[in-house]
Image (cartoon, helix red, strand yellow):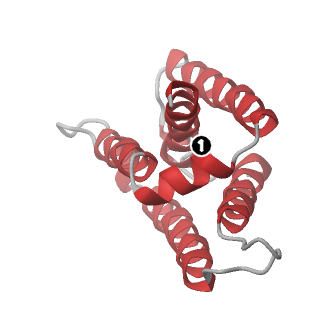
Amino acid sequence: MALTLGSSLGVFWLVRRAYLGPDGAPVAQVALFRTFFGLGLWLAFTAALGSSGVLADFDRTPPPMLVLVCVALLGSLVISFSPFGTRVMQTMSTGWLLGIQGFAALSFLGLAYGTSMGVGPWLARPPFVWLPTVLLPLGLAAHVLWWRRLLR
């Protein structure tokens, strides 16, 4: 849970930094609010779905958890290639880019560990539901932004 909240605050900090003017004053308070509100809404939505038990129904075809993870990953890609993603990518320092790669590897290892144990109902409940629905998409976005920055 601390990793998810810390990562969410890191995203908020990056967005805030991307929208600072030359004098250090925020130039787009609306963008900051939308980012903070949207991320909080996604955390609450995925936690509510996980708490309700809907995501733990792995007998359905396709499993609701798979659908939610695919939506999260697709959303991550859309945001990474949007003008918003471009602005965040342009303001990230090399140190941040390298640090995020380490975080993304941890996120992937955690998901691999969870799936190797046989994806059980525990992965579909909070706070573990945030591993594939929040941390994995953030890791994917980090990789995409990293490669976009390297290839420009």
Q: Secondary structure at mark 1?
A: helix
Residue sitting at 25 percent across and 36 percent down? 59
Q: Is residue 109 left or right of residue 102?
A: left
Q: Is residue 52 left or right of residue 14?
A: left
Whole-percent x, y for residue 150 in the image: 57, 26
Q: Is residue 70 above or below residue 33?
A: above
Residue sitting at 66 percent across and 23 percent down? 105
Residue sitting at 55 percent across and 76 percent down? 31
Q: Nearer the viewer, residue 86 or 116?
A: 86
Quarter of the image where one finds residue 138? top right
Quarter of the image where one finds residue 73? top left
Whole-percent x, y for residue 147 in the image: 52, 27
Q: Is residue 47 above or below residue 55?
A: below
Quarter of the image where one finds residue 6? bottom right
Whole-percent x, y for residue 144 in the image: 49, 34
Q: Is residue 95 left or right of residue 87?
A: right
Q: Is residue 20 above or below residue 147?
A: below
**Farthest residue toward the front?**
22
Q: Is residue 107 above or below residue 86?
A: above
Q: Is residue 108 left or right of residue 82?
A: right
Q: Nearer the viewer, residue 80 or 137?
A: 80
**Farthest residue toward the bottom?**
30
- From the image, tell me which residue sits under label 1: 135
**Farthest residue toward the left?**
61
Whole-percent x, y for residue 89 in the image: 59, 46
